[in-house]
Amino acid sequence: MGRMHLFEFEDQTWFPKLFRDFTTDFLRYAAQNQKQELHEKIASILNSGLKKSGTDYLVDMASGGGGMLVSLNTLLLKKHPSLKILLTDFYPNLEAFKMSRRSALNLDFIGRPIDAREVPPSLKGLRTQFLSFHHFKPKDAQRILQNAVDSQSGIFIFEDQDRSWSGILCELYAPVKLLKSVPYIKPFKFSRLIFTYLIPIVPITLLWDGLVSCLRTYSLKELKSLISKVDPGETYEWEMGRFKYGARPVVYLLGTFPKERYQTVDDR
């Protein structure tokens, strides 16, 4: 199945901020309630990236609600006690960012829009993108990688879906998880209840965006193609891989400076 860049509601400038924030709030809640073994696997890759990059700073791009790094923070601090995490987004969910900041002293955010394709030079550290790289068309995805290379910054990309039937089936279940989760998502809002249960805008848009995310996600072959177009990407060490936790597929890419090879891991 070839990659299809269909539209997602979350990407549209006309999509109401209220509904976009409801979606990122749910994704933050879901990330914080994933299995510990997945968090340990991601933390292991990130620890390696931080060590190779020689930094204790993570600059998270397209953070959404920032839930994944909030969940990983405790694990990362065991290896990097001086770790600092900065959340950014082109459509910042400020309420979620403030909640994330209250959860840890080493976590902060930028309240203004930050474009992952043109990261300000002042933001130094290993860049991360969780569940967001698929939002970018190939030309823009290449710009993200090129911008990291030009800045001599490491970059870690994580997607927990792909264009497989198992990935699609997992997204079909997402609205069910939403219906079960809404009463527990913080901050509690009656409007979230209304637009989930009475007027089901949130579950419908979540289902559509989840299915489209699968169709948009880059395969290992496509990631390798993007890397080949990055100049001078050969000065980086590139590692990419695909694995599963339960039925859910995971694709990741780690680029660190200044090694001279990339490797592919696929333990399906």
Image (cartoon, grey):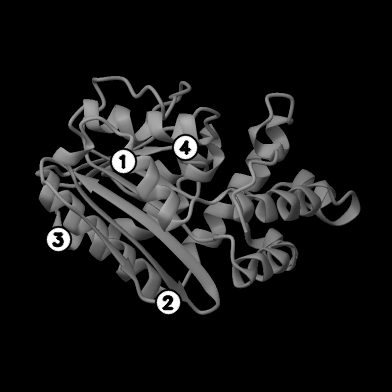
Quadrant, the N terminus: bottom right
Q: CA–CA distance between discs 4 and 1?
A: 24 Å
Q: Residue at x 23, y 26 (%)?
A: 150
Q: Residue at x 37, y 52 (%)?
A: 69
Residue 113 in the image, given as x and y percentages of width and height? 48, 22
Give, as a three-letter code, the residue at label 1.
Ser
Q: Compare marks 4 and 1 and give the one earlier in the sequence.
A: 4
Evaluate if marks 4 and 1 touch, with contact meaning CB atoms under 8 Å apart. Answer: no
Q: Residue at x 45, y 46 (%)?
A: 66
Label 4: which secondary element:
loop
Please identify the residue farthest to the bottom as the structure is shown.
Answer: 246
Q: Nearer the viewer, mark 4 or mark 1?
A: 1
Q: CA–CA distance between discs 2 and 3?
A: 28 Å
Label 2: which secondary element:
loop
Q: Which residue is mark 3?
A: 79
Q: Nearer the viewer, mark 4 or mark 3?
A: 4
Q: Nearer the viewer, mark 2 or mark 1?
A: 1
Which corner quadrant of the image does residue 29 belong to? bottom right
Which corner quadrant of the image does residue 177 belong to? bottom right
Q: Nearer the viewer, mark 2 or mark 3?
A: 2
Q: How many marks?
A: 4
Q: Which residue is mark 2?
A: 268
Q: Which residue is mark 4?
A: 62
Q: Which residue is mark 1?
A: 228
Q: Residue at x 80, y 52 (%)?
A: 204
Residue 119 in the image, given as x and y percentages of width and height? 34, 24
